[in-house]
Image (cartoon, rainbow, N blue to C red):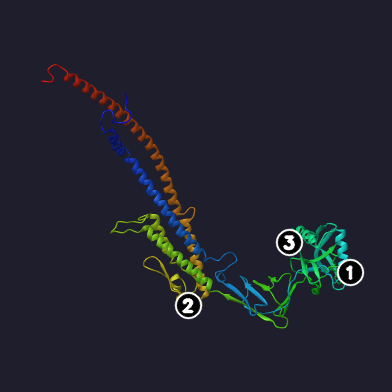
Amino acid sequence: MAVSSLGVGSGLDLNNLLTSLMQAEQQPLVALQRKEASFQSRISALGSLKGSLSSLQTAAQGFIPTTGQTALNKYASFSATVADNTIASASASTGSVAGVYSLEVSALAAGHRLTSPNSTDLVGTAALTAGLAAGGTLKIELGALTGTSPALAFAADSARELNVTVAAGATLENVRDAINTAATDGRISATIVNGTNGKQLVLSSTKTGTENVMKLSGIGGLDFNPAGAGTGTLSQATVNGGQAASNAAFKLNGIAATSSTNTVTGVLDGVTLTLSKTNVGTPTNLTVTKDSTTSLTTAVNSFVKTFNEAAKSMKDLGYFNADTKQAGALQGDSTLRGATSQVRSLLQTTAGGSSAYQTLSNIGIALQTDGTLKLDTTKLNAAIAADYAGVTSLVSTVGTRFKESLEGLVGTSGNITAATDSANRLIKDLGKRQTALLDRLNQVEARYRKQFSALDTLVASMNKTSSYLTQQLANLPGAASS
């Protein structure tokens, strides 16, 4: 009868024997697993190397002029200030021209605002009461006035027309809600002001400028025709809480200009003005300033910082401590050695041309014995002050060389990418070999188990026979005396 566990029948330590045999058989598998772990570690280390060099490539690319830029104007930045910041605020961007400009604001842009009659306007109130009682369709048009006063004409923009249904017997609140519901794009808003002379409906065009004049018709007491002198029950008069639509009007260095909004662009190249108050007769100064140094020194500092991070990464990956025998993940690796040598050689890039600033060391960027860079800010600033064009030409050349050369390391066809792909292929091959070896080991273990099980059964049977014979011999006559 077969036993369920090796050695139970025979008393032999067959389980430990099987374990020892399988450990010996598994040594080739262990070796393959160690190789795979080594390749995985290499892939991870190559990923770190690629990441640090990609960051360096990005920093170097910051030196390269983009489309439409030159090395000379790439680092120019502009700012704008208004002497009296209660009149306006300003900002400047690429394309601005440094200078001081006189700014005089005579009018601010405003949206159109109409108010319904209050209780003191008996005729208007009566018309409004009758109009609400009857109900109908309130037509609200947006457009612009053409011609000159008093022969003004209203040119409606049909795309912005609004038709609002007003139920018979509606209240001002009902009208307000109906308008706001219909004006889904927010171009018109309605509200109610409860003043000392009773409730008044206030209609506003939410965009400023003379292209946003309102015309209302269809409901008695809620009508307004902006043409001519502006007639109707509704009022745009300031005294009644109304407001005529208007453009902003101002002068820059005495030159008149207008804008449909109080945020003005396109009048002065690269400058955005935000008008907030008029100052007729007391112009203020708008100053546009150019700074060509700050962004250049920032780019240089970023490059040096990123280079040093990459240099430290390469050093950590390739170090070896003879005393502790500790080594980096890529110690002795040809890909790392090549990358380190390539990056250092790029530091010797020369600008060409007639400038005295031909290399990075000329502008205060020096290579240290530990492989990192040290920036002498004083020397850099002096170089920028002495030959701005020469310095920008140098860093542009360096940036281009770094970008192109590093692409040969970190690009899709680069050396690091190729080394990573090779390691992945080897891991895939090792995986196949391990699978095949595991199948063979399972067969070996099954064979051992079968053999040991047979041995266990045989020894158990022999032990049983031996015990029986011993018992029979003990029962023979004279066996006790012998």
Image position of 179 with respect to 149: above or below: above
In the picture, measured across the screen, residue 61 lies left or right of residue 213, that is: left
Residue 351: in sight, yes or no? Answer: no
Image quarter hosting the N terminus: top left
Mark number displayed over residue 123: 1
Up the image or down, 182 lies above or below 260; here it is: above
Mark 3 burial class by Cα count in 10 Å: few <14, some 14-19, many 20+? few
Q: Hey, what amino acid is under mark 1?
A: Val
Sooner in the amino-acid sequence: mark 1 or mark 3: 1
Q: Residues within 10 Å of mark 2 (few under 14, many from 20)?
A: few
* Residue 389 % position (x, y): 53, 73
Q: Residue at x 78, y 58 (%)?
A: 178
Residues at discs 2 and 3 in contact (Cβ within 8 Å): no
Q: Are marks 1 and 2 in contact (CB under 8 Å)?
A: no
Q: Quadrant of residue 313?
A: bottom left
Label 3 residue SS: loop
Q: CA distance from mark 2 to mark 3?
A: 56 Å
What quarter of the picture does the C terminus occupy?
A: top left
Q: Which residue is mark 3?
A: 186
